[in-house]
Image (tube, rainbow, N blue to C red):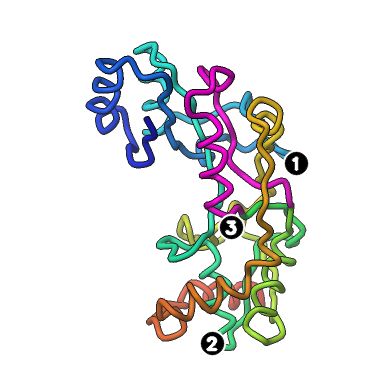
Amino acid sequence: MVDNWSKSPELIKPYADLAQSMSVDSYCFVSSAGMYKPSGDGPVAETCAVKSTGQREAEELLAEMELPYSYFRPQYIYGPKQGKSYLSYFFYRITRGRTILIPNSGDQFVTMTHAADNAAMIAAAVANGKAAGEAFNCATSKLITYTELAKLCADAAGVEADISYYEPKGLEIPKGFFPFRDTAFYVGVNKACDLLDFSPKYDLAQDIKWYFTDNYVAQGGAEKDVDFSIDEMITAAVAA
């Protein structure tokens, strides 16, 4: 069984009960890497500390019910016809001739992972005894900095990137304004590579142009009404 929908113990319970009654060989639950607590530089492993979130509580429920679970914790996904897009932050500004605001120095590493790579990892765990009772980070092994990502997006749009860096401390910036954490945050996938014989195949640098055309432009991103008031507040604070 693959559960890519539940976000809390209340939501997952009916499916967990059904899986238990069916004596399934595996329950693959797509959770989230967002539960990891800040840990400084370096890749985040599955053993790192996590916050108490709805998805973490759902993971714990599966363990309590002694189901043959596998947790999958994806981080910053992109793919065809994507709804929530982390890359739109950059494209909104690039296609309107605006400055791309990046917190701190811009050399923080992040990973952007194609949805097909995550699907391949999950498929490798179905009915795989090595995956039972394990958590797996879903990501690519290819790292990119925030500055490199901004330039990659600008190149896909055929323009030069106009980038400005700011110090987020002391500014009242709503959560989620910048789509990533202010500090480096990228998970390691060594465990999935070792146990599931997984190897990521996709590379954002090769995918960014079709993503811009087929996702951002095709879904009306360039015409969308976007509020840049927070950008203006940050720009004024930087100039002061």
Which residue occupies 66% across, 52% down?
A: 111
Asked if residue 6 lies left or right of residue 238, the reply is: left
The reply to whether the C-beta atoms of the residues labelled 1 and 2 are less than 8 Å apart is: no
Which of the two marks, 3 or 1, is nearer to us in this view? Answer: 1
At mark 1, the secondary structure is loop
**Magenta includes 137?**
yes
Cα gap from disc 3 to disc 2, whole angstroms: 28 Å
Q: Where does the N terminus fall, quadrant-wise? A: top left
Q: Judge whether 75 appears above or below 45 on screen.
A: below
Q: Position of residue 238 (x, y in %)?
A: 65, 73
Residue pointed to by mark 2: 96
Q: Judge whether 18 appears above or below 239 on screen.
A: above
At mark 2, the secondary structure is loop
Q: Position of residue 215 (x, y in %)?
A: 48, 72
Residues drawn in magenta? 113-142
Seen from the viewer's position, the closer of residues 180 and 63 is 63
Residue pointed to by mark 1: 41
Q: Label 1 sits on what residue type?
A: Asp
Which of the two marks, 3 or 2, is nearer to us in this view? Answer: 2
Mark 1: few/some/many CA within 10 Å (<14, 14-19, 20+): few
Quadrant of res 57:
top left
Q: Earlier in the sequence, mark 1 or mark 2?
A: 1
Q: Earlier in the sequence, mark 3 or mark 1?
A: 1
Residue pointed to by mark 3: 170
Q: Earlier in the sequence, mark 3 or mark 2?
A: 2
**Magenta includes 164?**
no
Seen from the viewer's position, the closer of residues 234 and 228 is 228
